[in-house]
Image (cartoon, rainbow, N blue to C red):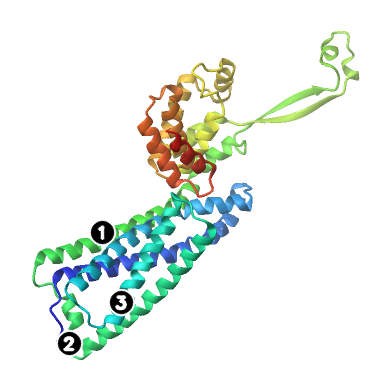
C-alpha cells in the first residue's frame, strides 16, 4: 500500500509540472518560432518594404537582441524548476521514500543536471565562457533533457498503471480535501504561471510591435529624407572662387554644374520619433538619441555655439529644448529595459554629469549593470559597460 501523500508533496509535484511546461514552451519558442533564423526570415519581407538595407551580420545581431527575452523567461522557469527538484529530493531522502529508487534517481539527477548546466549557460552573460566549454554544457543540457523526458514518461506510465490497479495514485495526487488553503495555493501558482506565459507573449510581441510602429517608420523616413525632404538646387562653378566672384568674369564661359541636395525635415522626424519613444518604443528611443547626440558636443559644459546655431537651423530646437528632449528620450529608453544604447548613455550621463545631469556613482553603476545585461553578447556597448563598471 502506498504511503499517504502530503499536501506539500502535491503542491511541489504540480508546481514542478507547471514549471517544466514553462521550460518546454520557452525552449521550443526560442528554437523554432523566435529563432534567429526565423526573425531574419521576417527581415527579408519587412526591410525591403521600408527601403532599408542591413547587412546579414547586422541582421543576425538584431535577431539575437529580439529573442533574448525568451531565454530570460526560460531561465526564470528553470530557477523555479531547479528549486522544486532540490526540495523534493530532500523531502524524499528525509522521508526515506526509496521505492522505485532507480527511477527516482534518474528523475532527480537529470533534473539537477538540467538546472546546473542551464544556470551556467545563462551566467555566461556575466562571466564569459570559452566556446568549447559552452558547447559542452549545451550538449550535456540536451542529454539531460532527453533523459528527464524518458524518466517523466516512465513516471506517467507507472502512475496510470497503478491507477488502473485501483491503487489510486493519480486520485491521491489530485485530492486536496485536507486544507482549502493549499487548494488556493495551487490555484495561485497556476494563475502565476499563466501570467508569466502571458507576460512572455507580450514581451515577444514587443519587437514586432515596435518595428511596425507608424510613428517610428514615418520618423525614420523623415530622418533619412525619404519623405518630406526639401530639394535644394546648388550651383557649382568650375573655376577658382575669386575669379568666379569677379565682376569682369564672363559668366557664360564658366562651366556651372547644378546639383540637387536633399534637406530632410528633421523637425518632423524628431516629433514622430519622440511620440514613438514616449510610447515605450525602445528602437525609436535609441534611433532618436543617436541622431540627437551627434548634433552637438554634448560632453562639453560650454556648447559650441556654431553647432547650436546649426542645430536650431536644422531642427528648430533651441539648446534648452534640445537638452530637454535628450533627457526625455534617455529616460524613455531606460524604462523599456530593452534599449541598449539609451541605457548605456544614461550611465555615461550619470557618470560624467553631462547636460546638467546630477553625477551619481550609484546610478551610473546600476545603469552600466543593466546595459551589460540587455546589450547583446558581442555588443560594443556591453563590453564598454562591463569595462566602465570595473573602474567605478
Image-based side of 263 in relation to 342, left or right: right
Q: Quadrant of the N terminus?
A: bottom left
Residue at the image point whose x is 46% and y is 64% from the top: 137
Q: Position of residue 157 (x, y in %)?
A: 30, 85
Q: Which residue is mark 3?
A: 105
In the rendered structure, are the residues bearing label 3 and label 1 in contact, judged by CB atoms less than 8 Å apart?
no
Residue at the image point whose x is 54% and y is 42% from the top: 380
Q: CA distance from mark 3 to mark 1?
A: 29 Å
Residue 32 visible somewhere in the drawing: no
Q: Of tags 2 and 3, which is closer to the observer?
A: 3
Q: Of tags 2 and 1, which is closer to the observer?
A: 2
Q: Which residue is mark 1?
A: 192
Q: Earlier in the sequence, mark 2 or mark 3?
A: 3
Q: Position of residue 321 (x, y in %)?
A: 45, 22
Furthest toward the bottom, the residue is 165
Q: Position of residue 287 (x, y in %)?
A: 52, 38
Nearest to the observer: residue 340 or residue 257: 340
Q: Earlier in the sequence, mark 3 or mark 1?
A: 3
Q: Which residue is mark 2?
A: 167
Image height of 52 relative to 172, above or below = above
Nearest to the observer: residue 192 or residue 88: 88
Element type where label 3 sits in the image: helix
Residue 96 visible somewhere in the drawing: yes
Which quarter of the figure has residue 294? top right
Element type where label 2 sits in the image: loop
Image height of 52 relative to 120, above or below = above
Q: Quadrant of the C terminus?
A: top left
Amino acid at each position: 500500500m502506498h504511503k499517504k501523500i502530503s499536501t506539500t508533496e502535491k503542491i511541489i509535484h504540480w508546481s514542478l509540472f507547471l514549471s517544466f511546461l514553462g521550460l518546454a514552451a520557452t525552449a521550443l519558442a526560442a528554437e523554432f518560432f523566435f529563432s534567429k533564423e526565423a526573425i531574419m526570415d521576417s527581415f527579408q519581407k519587412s526591410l525591403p518594404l521600408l527601403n532599408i538595407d542591413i547587412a546579414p551580420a547586422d541582421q543576425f545581431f538584431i535577431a539575437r537582441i529580439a529573442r533574448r527575452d525568451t531565454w530570460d523567461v526560460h531561465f526564470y522557469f528553470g530557477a523555479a524548476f531547479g528549486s522544486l527538484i532540490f526540495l523534493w529530493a530532500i523531502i524524499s531522502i528525509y522521508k526515506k521514500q526509496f521505492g522505485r529508487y532507480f527511477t527516482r534517481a534518474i528523475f532527480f539527477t537529470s533534473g539537477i543536471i538540467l538546472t546546473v548546466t542551464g544556470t551556467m549557460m545563462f551566467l555566461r552573460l556575466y562571466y564569459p565562457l570559452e566556446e568549447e566549454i559552452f558547447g559542452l554544457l549545451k550538449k550535456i543540457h540536451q542529454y539531460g533533457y532527453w533523459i528527464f523526458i524518458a524518466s517523466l514518461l516512465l513516471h506517467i506510465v507507472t502512475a496510470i498503471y497503478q491507477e488502473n490497479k485501483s491503487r489510486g495514485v493519480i486520485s491521491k495526487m489530485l485530492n486536496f480535501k485536507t486544507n482549502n488553503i493549499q487548494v488556493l495555493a495551487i490555484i495561485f501558482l497556476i494563475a502565476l504561471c499563466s501570467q508569466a506565459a502571458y507576460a512572455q507573449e507580450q514581451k515577444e510581441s514587443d519587437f514586432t510591435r515596435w518595428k511596425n510602429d507608424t510613428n517610428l517608420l514615418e520618423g525614420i523616413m523623415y530622418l533619412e529624407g525619404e519623405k518630406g525632404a526639401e530639394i535644394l538646387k546648388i550651383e557649382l562653378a568650375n573655376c577658382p572662387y575669386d575669379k568666379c566672384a569677379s565682376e569682369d568674369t564672363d559668366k557664360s564661359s564658366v562651366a556651372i554644374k547644378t546639383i540637387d541636395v536633399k534637406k530632410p525635415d528633421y523637425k518632423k522626424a524628431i516629433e514622430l520619433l519622440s511620440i514613438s519613444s514616449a510610447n515605450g518604443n525602445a528602437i525609436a528611443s535609441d534611433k532618436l538619441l543617436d541622431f540627437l547626440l551627434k548634433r552637438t558636443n554634448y560632453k562639453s559644459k560650454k556648447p559650441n555655439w556654431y553647432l547650436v546655431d546649426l542645430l536650431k537651423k536644422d531642427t528648430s530646437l533651441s539648446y534648452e529644448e534640445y537638452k530637454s528632449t535628450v533627457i526625455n528620450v534617455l529616460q524613455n529608453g531606460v524604462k523599456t529595459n530593452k534599449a541598449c544604447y539609451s541605457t548605456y548613455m544614461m550611465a555615461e550621463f550619470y557618470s560624467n554629469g553631462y547636460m546638467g545631469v546630477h553625477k551619481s556613482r550609484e546610478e551610473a553603476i546600476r545603469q552600466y549593470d543593466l546595459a551589460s545585461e540587455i546589450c547583446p553578447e558581442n555588443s560594443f556597448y556591453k563590453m564598454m559597460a562591463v569595462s566602465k563598471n570595473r573602474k567605478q
